Amino acid sequence: MPKNNREIEDQVLKALASLQDQSKPNFAKTAREFAVPVDRLRRRWKGQKSLFTRQPNGRKLNPAQELALCEYINYFDTVGLSINRAQISIAANSILEEAHSDKNTKPPQIGEHWLARFLQRHPELYRQAISVDGFTCPPLIILSGRQALLRWFEGLHGDEHIAVTDTGYMNDVLAYQWIQLFHKWTDEFLYAITQIRHKTFRPQTSKYGFKLTGLWPINSNLITDELSLYDNDNDRSRDTTPPTTSQHSDFSTPKTAKKVRRISDYIDTHNPTSSHYKQALEKLRKSAEMTVTLASELQRQFDTTQAATAARLARRNASRRHARITGIISPSQVKEIKRKEYKLSEEADQKRQRQSTGELKNV
């Protein structure tokens, strides 16, 4: 007798396969044979989805949209850029707005706690660097240029640091200076390394990794579900047996053109009435939806970047006073530069006044 929902689901799938072989489905007999609830078997036969494949209540984004958002975040990491929480929220709301078709109602938006739950579902995306006591290192902002403009520091009120390079990326000099600053801010880091290791490499972290890979609890479906798509065996019994859906099947959606072609080839050579065939079609559908959603978000980001670039070019006539200093610049250094400039300006004014007074006397 099945003891949990997963075991019951496995038996239901076997019962459904048995019903397909019956000329006149006998639900009561089949339910007794496989020890499953007859009402559940009847509902599943009529097309109701399993709890393991249905979208959980409260999810704003469907699996394809959520996968597209994950790929969108990973794209920033791939090109060496970072994305903050506000940008993730904007992207999620943009996806919901793009998919909303009712012109008479406002598009849905994510809730206050959606982002936290999203990151819990995808801990691999959580990259915020913060210490146990809440201390964060002041950020280093690297801009493209030869000299820093003093107006860049006018809106900074914390301990932010700015550096300029020809490329806008870190170089050996800045890396060395940053290490010195990091050591200054975290002078107790090495003393706390043992405690940090204990807090980082926790048992639940390792267990979660085992679970994701199917090592423990043992979940061979993470592999067999993928292999079943490329199985060229045309045996009818295998074609008509619905595969057991793993809890991570949403993330087996093809993400590359090569994998899409392989699934397309599978569809071309297999029985259209088989469950594997339908599963392959569903994967292609999700892949198409994910790709379109991702492309839409990247286009929106590109348009935003273009607008920001245009605004930056429009401000070319603004003040372009330079900070005559290289390397990493802190706000305190800029204040000192401004103080010296102010002093030099006062001295120049006094000199001009003395010259004007002397000219008047000569007249």
Image (cartoon, helix red, strand yellow):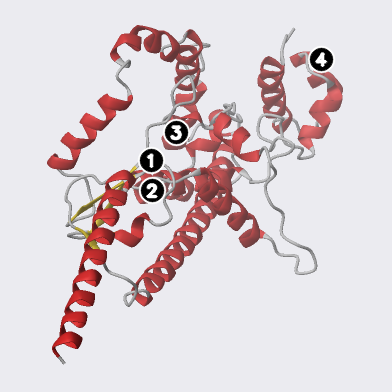
Instruction: Label 4: state its secondary structure.
Output: helix
| Labels 2 and 3 touching (C-beta < 8 A) | no
Q: Which mark is residue 32?
A: 4
Q: Of the residues tagged 3 and 4, which is closer to the observer?
A: 3
Quarter of the picture holding the N terminus: top right
Q: Which mark is residue 128?
A: 3
Q: Amino acid at mark 1?
A: Asp
Location of residue 264 in the rendering, given as x and y in whole percent from the top left corner: 44, 50
Instruction: Label 3: state its secondary structure.
Output: loop
| Labels 4 and 1 touching (C-beta < 8 A) | no
Q: Amino acid at mark 2?
A: Phe
Instruction: Label 2: state its secondary structure.
Output: helix
Q: Which mark is residue 159?
A: 1
User: Could you classify mark 2 by the number of other residues whose Cα lies within 10 Å: few (under 14), some (14-19), or many (20 or more)?
Assistant: few
State the residue position of label 2: 76
Q: Of the residues tagged 4 and 1, which is closer to the observer?
A: 1
Q: Of the residues tagged 2 and 3, which is closer to the observer?
A: 3
Q: Is residue 9 left or right of residue 309?
A: right
Viewer-side residue, 184 vs 230: 184
Label 2 – label 3 distance at C-alpha? 14 Å
Q: Amino acid at mark 3?
A: Gln
Q: Is residue 284 left or right of residue 314?
A: right
User: Could you classify mark 1 by the number of other residues whose Cα lies within 10 Å: few (under 14), some (14-19), or many (20 or more)?
Assistant: few
Q: Which residue is pictured at 23% across the width and 70% down the height?
A: 350
